[in-house]
Amino acid sequence: MPLDTVRVLLVDDDPDYPVLLRDLLSDIVDCKYEIDWASSYRTACEHIRRNTYDAYLVDYRLGEHTGLDLLRNELERGRLGPVIVLTGQATRELDLEAMQAGAADFLIKGAFRAADLERCIRYAIVRHQEKSAPAKATGGPSSRRMVCFLGAKGGVGTTTVAVNVAAALARSGKPTLALDLHPGFGTLALHLKASVRQDLGDLMRHAPEEINEVSMRHAVTSHAGGLDLVAAPQHAHKYRTITPEAARAIVDTAYHMSAFSVVDLPSDGSLANREAMWRSAFVGLVVEREPASLVAAERMLELLGSWGIRKAVGLVIVDRGSGYTLPVSAVAQKLERQVYGIVPPAREALEEAAHRPAPLVTANPNHEAARAMAALADRLAGDVLRPIAV
């Protein structure tokens, strides 16, 4: 945001609800929340005309009026500040109506925790600030950036690279969303020891046209260190095929939700992968320095080339420190690609980090592999993406 104090107007006719919300938000240590309460539509209008707020929490039912009436009229469809609609019952129709009226988000009473509410308010304020900020005089490109990591084959360490780069970006103060785009079980959440309530499988229940910032936010899990993630399905009954249309909606929404989006892709030729890579500023092809991995990388590059994905692809080389390995320069020459990251052996350090709720760059930032992945994150965050000289 960042704000030391966030002023919120709560509009709700239940006198117990402001007490409940103040108690919930008192658990947040990074920021102080000041909540004003309006018990009716009329009182809310008086508050809005007299004061300015960073965010508005508006109950859907307000006597003869609704929260959406307030949103459309006095709150000018969200132009005065982000509006989060509260309701006791969830219906898809109400969700869509709130979004069309200009709501920043939609929460079900009794179904969210303090961290969920804090994240919802934080995201809403950031997006409103971005929309309200004047355009840069230079007319330059958007400050948002999406990067994808794709393994030449399974088991080369793609998720390890993706989660550590995402954590390094978040640790440096950049709002970062990690997206695990595996249609079946994905291990990004496992790497972070994240407690996931909703995941990509839940999001995929929506039709592509219904996947937006409101629906995706319910699938976001906040992790320590400022990193947010959308986990792949964590249970078999949630496994779903990701159609190109759904993938396009997911990656476009992720792109607009955070300054940086880091996407962990499955090592396959799915059209969902194609949609993600078309949106990305950089695709890191993760490869080991051994013959089988190089053959797989060649085939993957052929596929990407057939999709028109060429210039944005660079190499991230993972060294496991065992078996026959080729020089880095030979890998780059054979694949005809520049190298942007070289991750040295880190088996013991990674095993140790696996027992903590943090990836290597956070658990052991001075380890050589952690420094290498943090350097890759810095490279990706720079104004100009520069390869490593090999």
Image: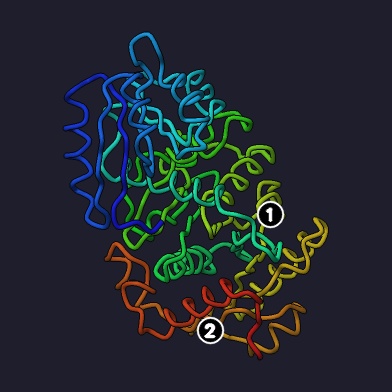
Question: Is residue 215 at least partly visible in the picture?
Answer: no
Q: Mark 2 highlights which residue?
A: 323
Quadrant of the frame with the N terminus: bottom left
Q: How crowded is mark 2: few (under 14 residues within 10 Å), some or many (20 or more)?
A: few
Label 2 sits on a secondary structure element that is loop
> Of 275 and 255, which appears nearest the observer?
255
Pointer 1 with pointer 2, Cβ within 8 A: no
Identified at 70% across, 80% down, the residue is: 338
**Position of 1 compared to 287: left or right?**
left
Q: Going 19% across and 48% down the picture, which residue do you hit?
A: 27
Which numbered mark, 1 or 2, is in the foreground of this view?
1
Could you say which quadrant of the image residue 361 lies in? bottom left
Q: Position of residue 108 (x, y in %)?
A: 35, 27
Residue at image mark 1: 279
- In the rendered view, tell whether residue 352 sits above or below residue 222: below
Tell which circle, 1 or 2, labels the residue nearer the N-terminal end. Answer: 1
Q: Label 1: state its secondary structure.
A: helix
Mark pair 1, 2: CA separation: 36 Å
Residue at 40% in and 39% down: 198
- Compared to residue 136, the image places residue 345 above or below, namely below
Q: Can the viewer see residue 273 in this picture?
A: yes
Residue kind at label 1, given as amino acid type: Arg
Residue 132 picture location, percent across and down: 55, 48
Amino acid at pointer 2: Gly
The answer to whether residue 117 is left or right of residue 338 is left
Q: Which residue lies furthest to the front in this view?
A: 50
* 64 and 86: which is toward the camera: 64
